[in-house]
Image (cartoon, grey):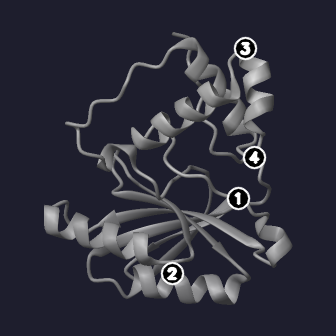
């Protein structure tokens, strides 16, 4: 991946990579009690993560339960927030979104107000596919998908360059998507 580092008007070419996500399980209230998952629940989750349109009767046969039991378990996991959403994964290239960039963002400070404002801005930006608030010397890692470099430049100006809370940012433009997914490895009980 090739990228650029921007700090108050300076630009340097770099080659590096990293990652990010809009959904934050840590943003949930810590007081929510999650039910313990048994081996059936874990098996159901593995199947649903591969294809959440798998018919419940097919899941039931695979995990040796009735379709009604599978339906109840899925509903319970949705209620508990274990299954956060059901979505379609869209091929960005099929929509003409040719640029994927991973951006490291350094805020001017880490005060709660500054961080919360940045989180709100990044969540609201439709071009931001993923965003993580991170440790390790940078504030955020943001994944942006854009149609071309002209559109990408406009996005970076709006979100970073013209943002008083951003001290600097580094763009890492992806050359090839080697792996992409949202599956979480479901550990055995």
Element carrying mark 2: helix
For disc 2, the neighbor class at 10 Å (few under 14, some 14 to 19, many from 20) is some
Marks 3/1 in contact by CB < 8 Å: the verdict is: no
Give the distance between the C-alpha atoms of the residues marked 2 and 1, in whole angstroms.
27 Å
Rendering quarter of residue 95 = bottom right
N-terminal-most mark, 3 or 4 = 4
Marks 3/4 in contact by CB < 8 Å: the verdict is: no
Give the distance between the C-alpha atoms of the residues marked 3 and 1, in whole angstroms.
27 Å
Q: Between residues 160 and 143, which one lies in front from this camera angle?
A: 143
Residue named by callout 2 = 156
Q: Which is closer to the viewer, label 3 or label 4?
A: 3
Q: Which is closer to the viewer, label 4 or label 2?
A: 4
Q: In this view, does 136 lie to the left or right of 126?
A: left
Residue named by callout 1 = 88
Give the distance between the C-alpha atoms of the residues marked 2 and 3, in whole angstroms.
51 Å
Residue named by callout 3 = 64
Element carrying mark 3: loop
Residue named by callout 4 = 53
């Amino acid at each position: 991946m090739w990228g650029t580092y921007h700090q108050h008007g300076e630009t340097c070419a770099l080659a590096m990579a990293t990652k990010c996500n809009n959904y934050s399980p840590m943003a949930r209230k810590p007081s929510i009690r999650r039910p313990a998952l048994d081996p059936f629940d874990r098996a159901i989750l593995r199947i649903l993560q591969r294809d959440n349109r798998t018919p419940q009767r097919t899941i039931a046969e695979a995990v040796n339960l009735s379709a009604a039991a599978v339906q109840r378990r899925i509903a319970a996991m949705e209620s508990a927030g274990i299954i956060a959403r059901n979505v379609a994964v869209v091929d960005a290239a099929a929509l003409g979104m040719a640029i994927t960039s991973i951006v490291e963002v350094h805020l001017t400070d880490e005060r709660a107000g500054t961080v919360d404002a940045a989180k709100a801005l990044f969540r609201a930006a439709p071009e931001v596919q993923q965003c993580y608030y991170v440790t390790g010397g940078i504030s955020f890692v943001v994944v942006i998908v854009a149609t071309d470099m002209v559109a990408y430049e406009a996005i970076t100006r709006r979100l970073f360059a013209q943002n008083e809370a951003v001290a600097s940012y580094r763009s890492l433009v992806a050359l090839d998507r080697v792996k992409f997914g949202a599956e979480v490895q479901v550990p055995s009980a």
